[in-house]
């Protein structure tokens, strides 16, 4: 195999280790490929993935800002659920006395803003064990900065209620407590349920170790087919699920096994068409977390031994790559689909656990554009001392369901020995 072929096979195999810094379905970081490493050749690779998610596609496929999940209209009915004794009686009396006020009257709307910046560094080692079998390892490290802000937009009806309670209603202490509780209802709800307060923070966490095997099963002048297996081990630090609403994650805490097939078809001297299929099984595990109550994730119901089964994933991809004297241009389309997550436990009602799996099935349509350059041609011509490669990819997510909608950038540097 030529030196240039060695570099390309190393580069494309290692790139498929991918970005594993965030839980949930991820946009692709490189194009599919059927290439394997030649026997005895090794590669050290460094991927740097940058993402700043601000929007997502909801269950209906509509693009929404992440903070929209905190937007909720609070009515008399919601307020009365949290009140007892004289406060509850006073508010009910005020509602009945003020013209136009009833249980469905909106008193305020909670709002929030979430800004996330994630940089994932993935060192990758790839080794050609035989001419047909290649082994790879990757261990991502994620640095994530999260900024969260919450607040409330009060209505004229709430102002009228407070005024009535402090004057005509004759319950000023209830009015004072209502003022306190409606300054930032999200923060108060978290505190009442024992949750840690929302705060801005930056964390660095190790991710899940990924082990990749690729086996070439067919090759001729124009075609190459490989079978692949990926084992993901839960070595990463999970997000905190108990009494913490927003947290970063290095891994998702459970073991995955993926099987796939890739096909390369060399249509022209410099043009290769590639395709790939992959199915990932996410094995069940046990973990601790808050169980929703009345549809709200802000709950003081905690189960330290619930069973979680994250949905299995299917991926299909097609791509074309043009390569001339080390200069590379590529474009690919990816389709991903993940089944719904399932949670079970015996401590609370089944409906509470079912709520945790709501809107967790996912669909992602994505495009990936790639530019790159390697020094192999110059190395062969003795015009450059070592074989290196650099590339830049940009992933776009034009459509999806329950997935991040923002673009993602990946920088790749590789050397071979």
Image (cartoon, helix red, strand yellow):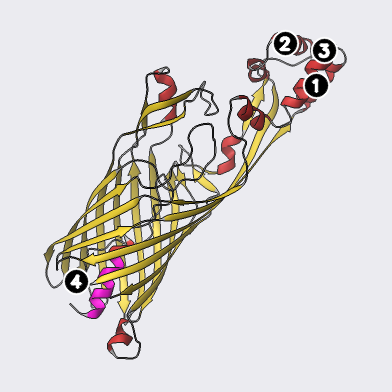
Span of residues in magenta:
3-12
Q: Are the two marked residues, 3 and 2, in contact with CB atoms closer than 8 angstroms?
A: no
State if disc 4 and disc 3 touch (CB < 8 Å): no
Position of residue 36 measured from the top left corner of the image (x, y, whole percent): 21, 66
Circle 4 or circle 2, nearest the eye: 4
Residue at image mark 3: 171
Label 1: few (<14), some (14–19) or many (≥20) C-alpha neighbours in 10 Å: few
Residue at 29%, 70% in the rendered image: 43
The prevailing secondary structure element of the residues shown in magenta is helix
Image coordinates of residue 29 in percent, x first then y, are 38, 59
- SS at badge 1: helix
Instruction: Give residue 40's mark.
Output: 4
Q: Which mark is residue 92?
A: 2
Which one is in front, 159 or 117? 117
Q: Residue at x 84, y 20 (%)?
A: 163
- Give the class, few, some or many, for how many residues have Cα within 10 Å of label 2's Cα (few <14, many ≥20): some
- Say above or below: 250 vs 300: below
Identify the image quadrant of residue 176.
top right
- The residue singled out by tag 1 in the image is 176
**Residue 321 pos. (x, y %):** 31, 69
Location of residue 192 by image quarter: top right
Mark-to-mark CA distance, 3 and 2: 12 Å
């Amino acid at each position: 195999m030529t030196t240039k072929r060695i570099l390309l096979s190393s580069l494309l195999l290692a790139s498929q280790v991918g970005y594993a810094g965030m839980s949930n379905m991820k946009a692709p970081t490189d194009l599919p490929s059927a290439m394997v490493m030649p026997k005895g050749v090794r590669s050290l690779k460094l991927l740097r993935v940058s993402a700043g998610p601000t929007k997502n596609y909801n269950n209906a496929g509509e693009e929404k800002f992440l903070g929209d999940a905190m937007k909720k209209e609070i009515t008399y009915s919601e307020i009365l659920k949290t009140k007892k004794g004289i406060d509850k009686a006073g508010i009910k009396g005020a509602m009945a006395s003020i013209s136009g006020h009833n249980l469905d009257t909106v008193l305020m709307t909670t709002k929030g803003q979430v800004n996330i910046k994630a940089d994932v560094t993935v060192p990758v080692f790839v080794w050609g064990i035989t001419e047909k079998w290649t082994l790879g390892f990757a261990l991502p490290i994620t640095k994530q900065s999260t900024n969260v802000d919450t607040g409330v937009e009060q209505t004229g009806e709430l102002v009228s209620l407070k005024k009535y309670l402090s004057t005509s209603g004759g319950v000023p202490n209830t009015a004072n407590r209502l003022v306190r509780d409606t300054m930032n209802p999200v923060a108060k709800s978290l505190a009442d349920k024992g949750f840690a307060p929302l705060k801005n923070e930056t964390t660095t966490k190790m991710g899940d170790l990924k082990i990749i095997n690729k086996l070439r099963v067919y090759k001729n002048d124009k075609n190459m087919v490989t079978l692949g297996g990926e084992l993901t081990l839960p070595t990463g630090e999970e997000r905190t699920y108990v009494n913490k609403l927003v947290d970063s994650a290095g891994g998702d805490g459970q073991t995955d096994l993926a099987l796939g097939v890739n096909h390369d078809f060399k249509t022209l001297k410099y043009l290769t068409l590639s395709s790939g299929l992959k199915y990932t099984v996410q094995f069940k595990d046990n973990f601790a977390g808050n169980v929703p109550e009345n549809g709200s994730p802000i709950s003081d119901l905690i189960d330290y031994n619930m069973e979680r089964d994250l949905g299995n994933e299917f991926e299909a991809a097609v791509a074309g790559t043009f390569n001339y004297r080390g200069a590379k241009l590529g474009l690919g389309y990816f389709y991903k689909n993940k089944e719904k997550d399932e949670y079970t436990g015996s401590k609370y009602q089944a409906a509470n656990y079912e709520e945790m799996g709501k809107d967790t099935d996912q669909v992602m349509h994505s495009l990936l554009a790639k530019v790159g350059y390697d020094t192999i041609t110059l190395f062969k011509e003795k015009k450059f001392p070592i074989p290196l490669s650099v590339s830049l990819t940009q992933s776009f997510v034009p459509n999806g369901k329950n997935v991040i909608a923002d673009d993602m950038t990946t920088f790749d540097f590789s050397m071979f020995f």
